[in-house]
Image (cartoon, grey):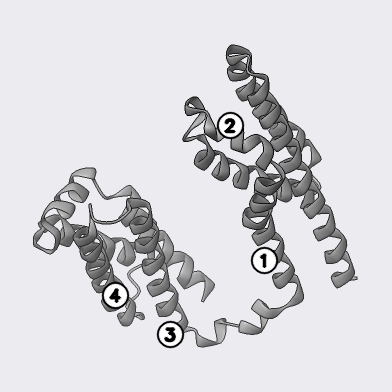
Amino acid sequence: MIELSVQLVLAHLLGDFVLQPASWIRDRNKRRFRSAALYYHTGVHILCMIVILGFNSGYPLAFGVIPLSHLFIDGLKASFHGRYNERILFLTDQALHLLVIGGVALYYFPEGLNLSLLRSPQVLLTVTALVFISYASGIILKVLLSKWSTEIRGDKKYQGMSEAGRYIGILERLFIFFFVVTGRWEGVGFLLTAKSIFRFGDLTTNKDHKLTEYILIGTLLSFGIAVFTGLVFRYISGLLNG
């Protein structure tokens, strides 16, 4: 199952990201299901599958379901173009493609899916840690920094930075968690140094003590939460595996 899944995903990545010109996307968004580029794109996917699967004719369902579903999903996405958030459309589009690929792989190798693994303590611990690091800790930081964030967001020159800052915070905590779990402490130092370098110029130019305090406290709290979570994860993992 894993080999087939990897082959189908590779064919998808080549067809969707490597071998799809921007002009095809523009034409598809404009003409939708009437776009010839949509059908060229589907044909490219079929060719990619044929090559990646090594001209193996043992998966007829894959050659039927995946290209047709891809054509329908992309055409439907084009129909919603300009009416909904493009990021949501893109993520939904890719998720649907991968679900179809997963379904096809599961059809040929039904024994390859072991749902009991998803309920194992180690998997549940990992999911819990990632949810806490990415979202729950963000809310905790928001509450802890509410005194400063209210003043910062009230200033017009800082409006609009909170949304980007939230995603930056999620990414940095995930990186730190990974570094701590894998014992790569030098990665934590590198990340902190890199962030300090990027921020140093802005803070020096602005000479705004309020912003400096807000960023410094937020960074230290974010790093601290990520390091603590990583250490707790390692400790509990040791108990589960010991």
User: Residue 146: x percent and y percent?
Assistant: 66, 42
For marks 3 and 2, the one nearer the N-term is 3
**Of the residues tagged 2 and 1, which is closer to the observer?**
2
Q: Are marks 3 and 2 in contact (CB under 8 Å)?
A: no
Q: Is residue 53 visible?
A: no
Q: Secondary structure at mark 2?
A: helix
User: Residue 143: x percent and y percent?
Assistant: 68, 48
Could you give the CA–CA distance between mark 3 and mark 1, rounded to whole angstroms? 27 Å
Q: Is residue 160 visible?
A: yes
For marks 3 and 4, the one nearer the N-term is 4
Q: Is residue 146 left or right of residue 232?
A: left
For marks 4 and 2, the one nearer the N-term is 4
Q: Secondary structure at mark 4?
A: helix
Q: Secondary structure at mark 1?
A: helix
Could you give the CA–CA distance between mark 2 and mark 1, rounded to whole angstroms? 33 Å
Give the camera-side residue of 29 and 85.
85
**Of the residues tagged 3 and 2, which is closer to the observer?**
2
Say what amino acid the circle numbered 3 marks.
Answer: Tyr
Q: Secondary structure at mark 3?
A: helix
Residue for badge 3? 107
Q: Is residue 49 left or right of residue 165?
A: left
Task: Using the rendered view, name the quadrant where residue 151 is placed.
Answer: top right
Give the camera-side residue of 52 and 102.
102
